[in-house]
Structure formats: C-alpha cells, structure tokens
Image (cartoon, helix red, strand yellow):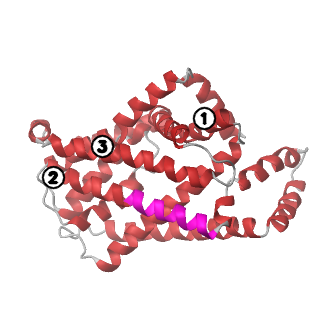
Amino acid sequence: MAVGLALAVLLMWLFVRQLSLAEVLDQLRRADYRWVAVATILTLLVNVHRAWRWHYLLLPIKPIGLGTLTSATFIGWAFITLLGRVGELARPVFVARRENVSTTAALATVVLERMFDLISVLSILAVYLLFFPLPTAIDPDSAWIIPQMRLAGLASLAGLVVAATFLTAAQLAPRRTDALMVRIMGLLPGGVGDRILPLARSFLSGFAGIRSPRLTITIAVHSVLIWLNILVTYYLLLFAFDIELPYYAVMPLIVMVVIGVMVPTPAAVGSFHVATQLALTNLWGVPADAAAGYAIVCHAIVFVPITIIGIILLSREGLSLRGFESEAVDLEAS
C-alpha cells in the first residue's frame, strides 16, 4: 500500500507540474456537464453489462442472478478503489458467500474475464494500427509512444496465447491435465502439493466456460459490446471540453489508459491521469489544460459513482470492509 501511495504522489506530481491551476479550474468550470452526465450513465451501464457477462462465465459452475452479480461487481469496484488490486478478490468472495460456490472457482472466472478484456483491448490496438491514421501530433519527442504500445501489445498477446493454450488444453483433456498436476504437486515437499491440488482443481473448474464454443462466443460478443460502450463513453466526454478529435482518436487513448492503470496506485490515481494526459497531448496535440480537465473528470466518473454505490451496497448487506479485506488477503495468500 505504501509503495502504491508513493507512486500515486509521484505520478500526480508529473501530471500537474507543468499545468496552470487557474487554467485547469477554468476548464472544469466551463465544461458541459450534460455530456459528463451521459458519460456517467454509460459508465454505470457498462458495469451492469460486466455483471451480465459474468453470469455466462459462472454458468458452468452455477446459474446466478443478475442482481447478485451486479451487487458483487459494484462492491468489487469499491474494494479496488479503497484497497488496490487486492480488491479484485472481493467479487469472488462475495459470490462464494452468497451462492455457496467455490471461491477459487469464482476467482478463476474473474481471471478468465480479464483475459477476454485483454483480448478486446489488443483488438482495439490492432484495428487502430491497421486501419486508421496515426496520431496527428506525433513528433520526435512523442514518437516513442507508438512502438511502446506495439511492444506492450505483442508481449501481452504472447502471454495470452500461452495462457489460453494451456487453459483450453486443460478443458479439452481434463484427465491428462489432472494427471500432470498430480505429478507436479507430488514434487513439492512436506505435503504442500496435497494441500494445493484441490485448490488447483477448483480453480481450473472456473474456466469450464471455454469448453463450450457457444458459450465462448456469447462471452466474446458481450466483451465486444462492453468495450464499444467504453469507447463511446470516452468519445462523448470529449464534447464536454470542446476537444475536437476524430472518433478513432479514443482507440489509442483507451489503450494508453489500460497500460497506465497497470501501475499499482490506489484507485489508479496518477497512473490514469498521466496516461490520459500523454495520449491527448503527445498523440493528438490537445492543449494541456483541456487534457488535464478531461483526465480529472474521466477518472472521477469511472471511479467515484461506482465506489459510492459499492459502499452503499456493502453496508446494506451488513458486511464490513475489514472482514472482506481479511478474507480476500487469505485467498490471495493461498
């Protein structure tokens, strides 16, 4: 947590160091908040849609209602905002408690969800680089961003191919996979393998969704629609600050934000802002004050409403942040 806070402070300093506070405040004051309201609604809807997609990811384990999954999704976002990446574990913990399913299997569906999201982001990057013009403000000082985006995309794709190959093989040949796991666990000392093997089996059961081509296609279609919603949201928010950019400008913007928020800062503070700033100013030549206003408001609508809703839902469930945090940490340690 301390490292994350230090990174957040450093990145926020980088974000504001060459900005005029008066100009940024003026941008925020003059923004058209009707577009901000529309973007906020779309952001809330995309999280409901994530819960809908999660229903299909969990279907091989147990059919779970959209209400429960929506509550879990908003509570999970609240935990991510307040606790950092360990908050990702709140969703499977909540669903396991409510629906009496394996926590490790539920966690595996969250991992599978992230894989579909990564495929979607890599597809956005590929489509942009293949079919649309490069950013208009690229100069020698900014040109490093494009090869870095390509490198990050290729590295992610390579890791994704390896993981997808193993997981698909595990689902198509479960007996061979289980025999392989038994052999590997048998090499561990002191009976450690005997304790880990049931968790590994339960975890792999959470990937059963990719065993069915029809279910896989359904999840993929939902993933495409979710990310189209996100692209539209980021584009509409440009209107709030009178930033005139072509519609395809949000494609590298989204990729940059996704790369940026991989930096582990609380609620993506600093990492989100710097990534957005770099994409708008270095790639498209947007004035620094307008880019800063956009980054601040965009970060707020992504994190603040869902965090407030998540905390309200958490209190209505009669659950404590500390108790969930303890259980999530135990799950992470296992």
Which amino acid is tagged 2? Phe
Q: Is residue 320 left or right of residue 305?
A: right
Q: Is residue 85 left or right of residue 305?
A: right
Magenta range: 213-227
- Residue under pointer 1: 94
| Disc 2/disc 3 C-alpha distance (Å) | 16 Å
Q: Determine whether label 2 and label 3 are within 8 Å by CB.
A: no
> Is label 3 or label 1 in front?
3
Q: Determine whether label 3 and label 1 are within 8 Å by CB.
A: no
Residue 224 is situated, as x and y percent measured from the top left of the image, at: 43, 63
| Helix, strand or loop status at disc 3 | helix
Considering every residue shown, the one lying at the far bottom of the view is 130
The answer to which of marks 1 and 2 sits earlier in the sequence is: 1
- Residue under pointer 3: 41
Which amino acid is tagged 3? Ile
Q: Is residue 224 magenta?
A: yes
